[in-house]
Amino acid sequence: MNSLLYISTVLIWGSTWLAIAWQVGEVAVPVSVFYRFIMAALVLLIGLMLWRRRQPLSGQDHLFCVLQGSCVFGLNFYCFYLAAGVLPSGLIAILFSMSTLFNAFNGYLFFRTPVPRVFYPALVLGLLGMAMVFWQDLVAVQATWTLAGAIGLSLLGTFGFSLGNMVSVRHQRRGLQISTTNAFAMLYGALLLGSIALLQGASFTLPAEPRYLGALIYLAVIGSVGGFGAYFMLVGRIGAGKAAYATVLFPLVALALSTVFEGYQWRADALTGLVMILSGNLLMFNAHKVVWRWLKPERRLIDGPEVRHGGNTERKI
């Protein structure tokens, strides 16, 4: 079962980036994001009500769901969809995989979670890897500003996703169900993007193009409900640390699909940069093990050796 959930998460998340690229074009970006998450929210909320699993939330909890929805299911995807008009979907997936670095930074900023020492070499690997992936395109003067803007939007969207993760940490510390908070966060994120679309005067009419409609249904049901559901089930079964390796592997799926369907051309420097970025992510995923090894000797010095008296255990200070 764990293997099935893991493979499902990698394949679903890896394939959503191509589906996003297929939605870019005729329909305004906020309209596409609105339809995606309003459909996903309704599927989740109806399912929770049918199975009587919806958890009551306080007014304050709903406000945090608004914040989470804006960061994870709203403005960040606004950025990703805009970037998808310029960058191949696989490259956006690579940039998104750097969310682990943003998580480490935001974890310290909001919860004072210690930043492991491996954060710094991982950051260097990530930045150098990004430079190698995009260098040849950036030095082409005619494409520099457009490409740089798309890269910036992708990183901004990734940072927003990381901020939403911090809100999710808050939810879990309060004992709130992930399915309930995700459902309302998706709803609020969709309503925010719908409001932006109204302010822009965008049309909510969807094209009859099968590829667009197929991508929309796939993103709403499989990508949003199924993908997040499989991931959080995996977290519950094997833990967040092991489940997080999915974010290392799904860019490979996205790049493979981009190569086949978008004609992405591989170069040696881009491949080297990809390896560097993924290596930085692997460092971050093993950070908890490294930190524990550093802390164990320190704990022995602080707590002192254990001394047993009969059935009791004491520590000398």
Image (cartoon, rainbow, N blue to C red):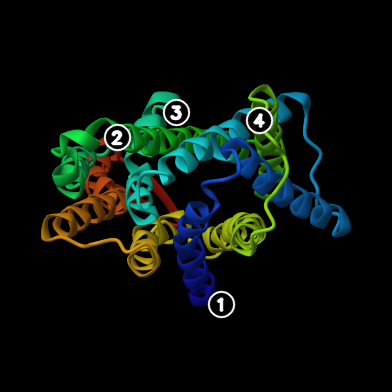
What separation in Å lies between label 1 and label 3 (alpha carbons)?
Answer: 33 Å
* Pointers 3 and 4 in contact (C-beta within 8 Å): no
Residue 180 image-quadrant placement? top right
Specify which label sits upstream in the sequence, 1 or 3. Answer: 1
Q: Amino acid at mark 2?
A: Val
As drawn, the label of residue 133 is: none
- The three-letter code of the residue at mark 3 reads Phe
Q: Quadrant of the C terminus?
A: top left
**What residue is shown at x 53% (from left), y 76% (from top)?**
4
Which is nearer the eye, 133 or 141?
Answer: 141
Label 4 neighbour load within 10 Å: few <14, some 14-19, many 20+: many
Circle 3 packing at 10 Å, graded few (<14), some (14-19), many (20+), is few
Q: Give the residue pinned by disc 2.
A: 115
Q: Is residue 268 visible?
A: yes
Provide the residue designation for mark 3: 111
Question: Which residue matches tag 4?
Answer: 197
Q: Which residue is mark 1?
A: 1
